[in-house]
Image (tube, grey):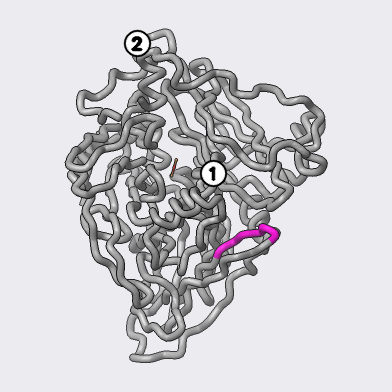
Amino acid sequence: KRIPKWMPKVVMKNTTKLCSSKSIVTINGKFPGPTLYAREDDNVNVRVINKVQYNVTVHWHGVRQMRTGWSDGPAYITQCPIQPGQSFLYNFILTGQRGTLLWHAHISWLRATIHGAIVIWPKKGVPYPFPKPYKEKLIILGEWWKADTEAVINQSMQTGLPPNISDSHTINGYPGRVPGCTSQGYTLHVEAGKTYLIRLVNAAVNDELFLKIAGHNLTIVEVDASYTKPFTTDTIFIGPGQTTNALLITDLQTTGKYLIAVSPFMDTIVAVDNLTAIAFLRYKDTLAFPPPVLTTTPAINATSETSKFMDNLRSLNSKKYPASTALLQAHYYNISGIFTNDFPGNLPVPFNYTGNFTGGISTSNGTRLYRLAFNSTVQVVLQGTGIIAPESHPIHLHRFNFFAIAKGLGNFDPKNDPKKFNLVDPVERNTISVPTGGWTAIRFRADNPGVWFLHCHLEVHTSWGLKMAFVVDNGKSPDESLLPPPSDLPKC
Ligand code: C2O
């Protein structure tokens, strides 16, 4: 099943969901797309062949891309898009990486339909740091609009109004139950008395999500392809771009059918999206039509649930701490005028970001990059500033796993908050929620030269400008330098 060499095709596919059909942009006609199975240290070669009338790029979300920044994928950040009829070879090595990640289109809103999982098994002979699962099951969460998603965002950008919310969430491609429209749902088939490894991916476009399985607990063992200290919970909180591996231990003697429910978390002032997607867990030997055991997910604004979940995430070992024209072309070829380095540095402190903030209320688009010296240890405090519609933002940093060392409500206090930093076992992630009207502090080592995108993984916020990039300079030795660009790098 390993496919480190792959030639996926971008093709249109007529798809019916919620009793309504439309033509969508897909990889190989699949929604969600095919899974990339690989092993730690594999050299992955994916030639993406674009057969549609849209420009496309593909991002390998969470892949470290050591010296291969050309293969990271965000359009106009590391590459110009692959144009209709063209192809591009993404080539990277999964050095020291194993776990669950995701790939997705990274241009406009194409990731709504172009996404899939990356499953990276540990090196041969290296066991998981938890009991060997009987079977592994992949669950990919998505979001579905009956309308064309490119039209949805284009209209929003033109009118300045928020885009229409999705019509449903999806579980492995199947939407929830909609009145008046019977659709088949996803069924997770299990046997009694076994341990399953659930690999959960949130590929939704704009929503952080809760997931719950009636009558069953889940033991989290990994997030964003980084092992965690196991902790058991009945509810998973997962932001778009995040992945969570959990053990599901089935009951010894059970038959029956159990609801799997997925609903959004959105603690904005106006909670607008509350569709619950459903699927079922079904024991083998269950008779034809059992009444399902039901459950309910937390309320849409259940902030305390999200906070509790995140506080329980701790990395397995702490020893690594803290070691642990596209912009990239402009950087590599020293082309001036494409970006500027005048990223605002230290803002006047103290400053009440969440209270009397009277500055501009919206983000602006720009190409100011923040420059980092090779191998520097970087601490970033992500401060939520919104006062009009504060909400939780799943912020994603490309190609780094960072340590989430603390979070808090209100304004970050540079004097007292560092005392709260977890410098022992902070969870290691590539995407982290910045709490509503609060802050999150992260640390990472800038050990990979290139241009690396940082943005909110609620896609509409990326459209609106909640994004920036770091430039990491080359190190001194040649093997600390960005490799030359591939010969088939697309032209703008
Ligand atoms: Cu998963 Cu920049 O994205």
The range drawn in magenta is: 264-269
Residue nearer the viewer, 84 or 66: 84
Q: Mark 2, residues whose alpha carbon is within 10 Å: few (<14), some, or many (≥20)?
A: few
- Whether residue 407 is visible here, answered yes or no, is no
Whether tag 2 and tag 1 are in contact, CB under 8 A, the answer is no
| Element assignment for label 1 | helix
Quarter of the image with the C terminus in it = top left
Q: Position of residue 451 (x, y in %)?
A: 44, 25
Is residue 396 rendered to the left or right of residue 390?
left
Figure check: 414 above or below 153: above
Quadrant of the image occupied by residue 487: top left
Residue nearer the viewer, 318 or 451: 451
Residue 464, label in figure: 1
Amino acid at the residue labelled 2: Pro
Residue nearer the viewer, 6 or 75: 75
Is residue 38 rendered to the left or right of residue 433?
left
| Separation (CA) of disc 2 from disc 1 | 38 Å
Q: Position of residue 347 (x, y in %)?
A: 72, 25
Q: Position of residue 483 (x, y in %)?
A: 31, 19
Amino acid at the residue labelled 1: Trp
Residue under label 2, please give it.
478
Q: Position of residue 283 (x, y in %)?
A: 38, 79
Figure check: 13 above or below 49: below
Which residue is pictured at 55% across the width and 49% down the height? 229
